């Protein structure tokens, strides 16, 4: 419990912080482009074993829900692209090579998942491993 508090002490709350950049595909992205539907913003790293355990869940979730992932401190676009191909992952990825985006969101550990509601408000936060059922339930609740 103390460890969880420590990890989330500076984490973003209320309105979702701005998140803008270029996806791994080259397409521009902003958090505002997702308004109107719930969005999962998922911070991960290719070197993180817990993130690896969760990546197939995130990949599956991205097939039916709006998902934006942020690869933080995982190398440049070529490094992340190679990792995605090797692991047959297709979820949208924004590169955070230097960890600046994660820092702006108050991330102290990965994986960290934020459910953003239709109005752009952070509805729930999970740090560490989260089940697919748990994420789907949170996304469903954010639709209300």
Image (cartoon, rainbow, N blue to C red):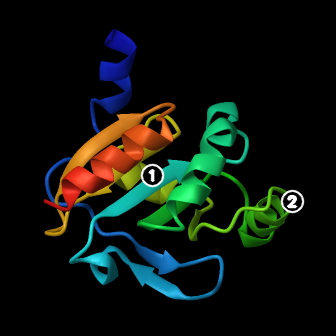
Quadrant containing the N terminus is top left
Residue corresponding to mark 2: 86
| Image quarter of residue 116 | bottom left
- Could you tell whether 81 is left or right of 10 in the image? right
Question: Is 99 in front, or is 116?
Answer: 116
Give 13 or 115, whichever is nearer the viewer: 115
Give the class, few, some or many, for how many residues have Cα within 10 Å of label 2's Cα (few <14, many ≥20). Answer: few
Numbered mark located on residue 32 in the image: none
Residue 107, can we see it?
A: no
> In terms of sequence position, does the residue under pointer 1 or pointer 2 come before the other?
2
Mark closer to the observer (1, 2): 2
Left or right: where does residue 14 sit relative to residue 115?
left
Q: Is residue 97 above or below residue 49?
A: below
User: Mark 2: which secondary structure?
Assistant: helix
Nearer to us in this view, 26 or 132 = 132
Q: Are marks 1 and 2 in contact (CB under 8 Å)?
A: no
Which residue is pictured at 80% across the width and 71% down the height?
A: 78
Residue 81, placed above or below residue 13: below
Residue 71 is situated, as x and y percent measured from the top left of the image, at 60, 57
Quarter of the rendering containing residue 19: bottom left
Residue at coordinates 28% horizontally, 65% vertically from top-left? 38
Q: CA distance from mark 1 to mark 2?
A: 24 Å
Q: Which percent across, then down, holds residue 114?
A: 34, 50
Mark 1, secondary structure of its residue: helix
**Residue at x 44%, y 59% (from the top left corner):** 101
Q: Is residue 135 visible?
A: yes
Q: Is residue 134 left or right of residue 38?
A: right
Count of all numbered marks drawn on residues in the image:
2
Which residue occupies the extreme bottom position in the image? 27
Per the image, the residue denoted by label 1 is 102
């Amino acid at each position: 419990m103390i460890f969880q508090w420590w990890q989330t002490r500076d984490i973003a709350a209320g309105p979702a912080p701005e998140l803008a950049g270029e996806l791994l595909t080259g397409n521009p992205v902003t958090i505002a482009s997702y308004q109107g539907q719930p969005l999962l913003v998922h911070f991960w790293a290719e070197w993180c074993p817990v993130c690896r355990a969760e990546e197939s869940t995130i990949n599956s979730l991205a097939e039916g829900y709006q998902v934006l992932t942020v690869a933080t401190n995982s190398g440049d676009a070529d490094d992340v692209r190679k990792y995605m191909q090797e692991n047959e992952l297709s979820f949208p990825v924004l590169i955070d090579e230097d960890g600046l985006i994660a820092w702006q969101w108050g991330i102290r550990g990965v994986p960290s998942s934020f459910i953003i509601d239709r109005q752009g408000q952070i509805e729930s936060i999970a740090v560490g491993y989260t089940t697919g059922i748990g994420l789907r339930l949170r996304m469903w609740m954010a639709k209300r």
